[in-house]
Amino acid sequence: MKHVPTRLFIGLTLLLSACGAPLSTLDATSSDLQALGGGTKTTAPAAQMVLTTADAKNLLARQSDLSFRADAGSTTYTIDVDTTRTYQEIAGFGAALTESSAWLLNSKLDATRRSEVLRKLFDPALGIGLSYLRVPMGASDFALGSYTYDDVPAGQTDETLANFSVARDEQDVLPTARAIRAVSARVRFMASPWSAPAWMKTSGTLSGGSLKPETYDAYARYFLKFVRAYEASGVPIDAVTLQNEPHHETTAYPSMRFEASDAARFVGQHLGPTFQAAGLQTKLLGWDHNWDEPSYAQTLLSDAAASSYLAGSAFHCYAGDVSAQSTVQAAWPTKDVYFTECSGGGWATNFGDNLKWNVENLVIGATRNWAKTVLLWNLALDDVGGPTNGGCGNCRGVVTIPSDGSAIRYNVEYYALGHAAKFVSPGARRVASTTFGVGNVQSVAFRNPNGTRALIVLNGASESRSVKVREAGKSFTVMLVPGAVATFTWAPL
C-alpha cells in the first residue's frame, strides 16, 4: 500500500460520524473458534450457519443448524443458489507476508505464541484457513529496510546476476512461509516486486525511476532466479505480478514506474520467453494496481506477444470501483482476475462499518467480479502499525502483535476473511446466487471440490431482513440483523 486510501477515508469517516464509540480490534478467543464446531444438529437435510454481527457480539459464531424443507414459493429476499451455473475457480483468500509481518511472527513471538497465531490464521479446522499469501520480491513499504536480491555499490552493475541472493529473506520471510506451509500444505504464494535493483533503473535508486530497456533481459533472469530460489527454499511460487502499483512512483520507499507499453514489451519479449524456456509453470499477472485504471490491464492484454504469456490481471482497492474487474474480464474472458491488496487502518476503526465494507466490496464484491483471490495487505503489524519502511503510518494488519508482548489482537479483517477462507476451499467454483445490491441483502455462493456448498450473505440494510435460501426446490429461512454476515454450508441436496 502506498498512501492512505482517500476513497475509504472519506466514506468511512461519514459512517463513523453517525455511529457510536469505535471498536478498533478484537481478540479471537479459543471459544470463538471452538464455537464453529458446536450448534444444534437436525436429522433433516440441514445447513450449518456461522455468524458475525456488527456489534461484535458474534464472531464467527456457530448458530443452530437450519433444516431444508420443501419450498413453498419466493419471498422478498429469496436467494436462489444454482450450482449448474459456474464462474471462476477460486485460488484462495489471505494477505501479504511482508518482511514486517514475517519479522513480527518469526522474531517477536516465542514458539508457543507463534504456533498459536499461525494455527488461528491458517489451520482450516482450528482457525480460519487462509490459503493464499502475497510476498514482496525484496523490500516494500513494510520492511525493516530497503533491499533487493542483487544490490551492488553505486556505479556498478551485475548483468550476470552473480550477486543474486535471497539470503536476506532467510532471516524471517522464508522461515515464516515454511512454518505456514507446515500448518497448512494447501497455502500457495504469489510474489510482487516493488522495485528492480537500483543499477537496472533510470533513477539509480530503489525509490522511484523506471526500468532501463537495456536491463530487460537481466530483470527477466532476476525473476527466474527468484522463483527458483524460493522453490529450492521450500516455498513454491504460484504467480508473480510484473510490478506492484506501476503507476505509483515515490521517493519515500521502493517503487518503480512501469508504463503499460513498457510492461508489455518486457513480458512479451523477455520475461515470458525466459519462463517458458525454463519450463516454469509460475503464472504471470499484469497491472497489480487500483480499480480506477482498467485500461492499463486492457493495454497489456491487447498486446499479442504479452497476452500470450499473461494469465491475467491483478487489482487493488484504493481508487475506483470493483466493477472494473468485470470490465476487463468481459473484454478478455479467457484471462483470470486476481484481487491482491487492500488495507484497513486508523482512519476507520468502527468494527461494524469495516466488516460491512470488507465483505461488501471484497469478499462478495471482488469474487462476484471474477476474482480468484481476495488478499488483504499486511498479515500482521504491531500496535503502532509497523514496522514501516516509509509508507502508511497507520495501517492495520489482519492481526496485531503488540510490542509490549500483550495478547495478540485479531482484527475485523480476520473475521471478514474467515467467512470465506474457512468455508471456501482452493479449487472451489463460484456459482450463481441471487443478490439484491449495495445497501441490501448481498450474497456470493461457491461449490467446493467435494461438492459442498458455501453461501456468504451480508445484510447491508439498516433494518433486519428475513432471508430465504433455496436450492433444488428446498429452502430454509433465517432472520439477519443489520450489518450481519453469515456463511451457510451444506451438502448437495
Image (cartoon, rainbow, N blue to C red):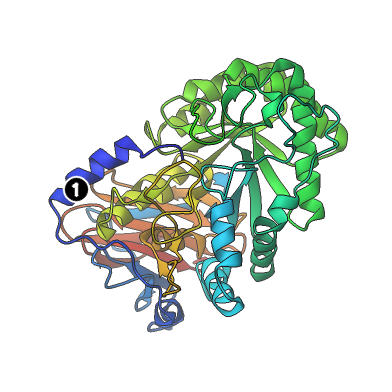
Q: Nearer the viewer, residue 195 or 441?
A: 195
Please tell me in which quadrant of the rendered image residue 448 appears.
bottom right
Query: Left of 99 or right of it: where is 395?
Result: left
Residue position marked by numbered label 1 in the rendering: 15
The residue positioned 47% from the left and 45% from the top of the image is 367
- Is 461 above or below relative to 54? above
Q: Nearer the viewer, residue 474 or 361?
A: 361
Q: Residue 148, position in %: x, y?
A: 68, 39
Query: Left of 187 or right of it: where is 253?
Result: left
- Is 182 above or below relative to 458? below
Q: Can the viewer see residue 362 in this picture?
A: yes
Q: Residue 7, position in %: x, y?
A: 30, 36
Count numbered badges in the picture. Answer: 1
Number of residues whose C-alpha sits closer than 10 Å to that of mark 1, classed few (under 14), some (14–19) or many (20 or more): some
- Is 130 above or below relative to 2? below
Residue type at numbered disc 1 = Leu
The residue positioned 46% from the left and 52% from the top of the image is 82
Please tell me in which quadrant of the rendered image residue 209 appears.
top right
Q: Can the viewer see residue 272 in this picture?
A: no
Q: Callout 1: helix, strand or loop?
A: helix
The residue positioned 48% from the left and 28% from the top of the image is 248
The residue positioned 30% from the left and 53% from the top of the image is 354
